[in-house]
Image: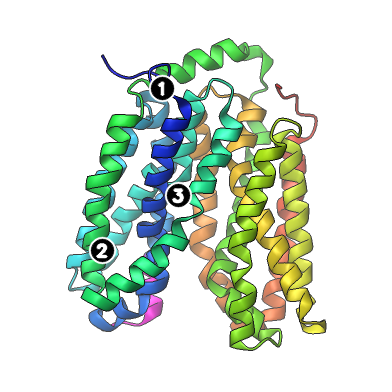
Amino acid sequence: MSPSTHDRPLWTIVGALGVAQIIAWGSLHYSIAVLAQPMARTLEVGVPTVLAAFSGALLASGLASPLTGRLLDRHGGRLVMAAGSLLAAASLGLIALASHPAVFIAGWVLAGAAMAATLYDAAFATVVALSEGRHRQALTALTLLGGLASTVFWPLTYALDQTWGWRAALAVFAALHLLVCLPLHLWLVPRHAAVASRRQAGSVSAPAARPRPGARLWWLAASFAFGAFISSALSVHMLDTLQSSGLTAAQAVIVAVVVGPMQVAGRIAEFLAGSRVKAISVGTIAMAVMLIALGLLLAVREAGWIAFAYAALYGASNGVLTIVRGTVPAELFGREGYGALLGKLAAPAFIGKAAAPVAFALVATSAGYFSAVTALWVLGLLSLLAYLLAVRGARVSG
């Protein structure tokens, strides 16, 4: 017999998906930060070309997300995420073998499709379908595990590159998808997740108890897209932005290191508060804190300690907003059709992610980093306002 949610404890499934998330995020997303320069040297192209290929992957992921969401609802996470692992292995193998920029770019576009089927949105949809009302803490636990990806893969990627080169590093990552992620998805994720989702959604609330998404969905999509743009721009340009505010390179690195632990701290706080504070309220607080953090980034030149306050608040809010992206849609709209819903929300967010590094660099080059960060603050304000419009008057379940 195939496994069901009752055969396998939820936390076993979350643990398995968490390990797969570490590998997926580490290999498909974080490795580029270490490998961009050696890739550019080997292929005899500029680093911007390599980063443009990675942006193409993010764009492809956004375009693939709506279809992936519908497939998750129809077939469940087991088959979709297993297929994503195969795509990830194939894409990394193609990139590793690329000797021409066109093949390299094609490999990253394929990696984008793999991202849509293996990263948080797919895992969130899978967990929500199996959680029987316990999805919020389960999603937080999943992001706590996934948050280790950069900590594990940055040093691992560096060591592999230094020892055998970037092509061998990607070959190792492809093998991890085949030998670790694929078995985890096939063996530990129940076969009929989509059926479980429909049954649970029907038992939690009648269809009439939930409002149609309508404009509320598009306001939420806009909010998440603005937030994704901000986090993507800062993940690439944080060190340059801090140095433009008067910090030395060494000081900027020390400040940036604060972000990671504070992301974890924010997620732990959300986990502990999960039973007492509605996800919608957590989202409002996190977006307000993000706005404050961006305001502090504008003021770093006034005093060095402000940089640490910025990094702490930005890290905590950014960590929590990852969870909000999974919990608030379920609280607003219920869990029926949740995969398709996340796919609709993910598409504009990934497009924002793809555009952000280049757009921020263009503004910073033409008008200065202060103007670029000011633009991010405006986007943060728009993100908060769009979110408030999305959740205005919402009725949620306990």
Residue at point 80% right, 29% down?
393
Q: Nearer the viewer, mark 3 or mark 2?
A: 2
The residues colored magenta run: 44-53
- Disc 1 marks which residue? 194
Residue closer to the observer: 134 or 331: 134
Quadrant of the snapshot with the C terminus:
top right
For mark 1, give the secondary structure: helix
Residue 280, image quadrant: top right
Residue at point 31% right, 79% down?
38
Q: Give the mark nearer the N terminus: 3 vs 2.
A: 3
Residue 60 image offset from top left, x and y in percent: 38, 53
Whether pointer 3 and pointer 2 mark residues with C-beta atoms closer than 8 Å, the reply is: no
User: Considering only vertical position in the picture, is 307 above or below 126?
Assistant: below
Residue closer to the observer: 169 or 280: 169
Residue density around tag 3, few if under 14, some if 14–19, many if 20 or more, within 10 Å: many
**Callout 2, which amino acid?**
Leu
Residue at point 75% right, 64% down?
293
- Disc 3 marks which residue? 62
Q: Give the mark nearer the N terminus: 1 vs 3.
A: 3
- Disc 2 marks which residue? 170
Residue closer to the observer: 182 or 62: 182
Residue 148 image offset from top left, x and y in percent: 48, 55
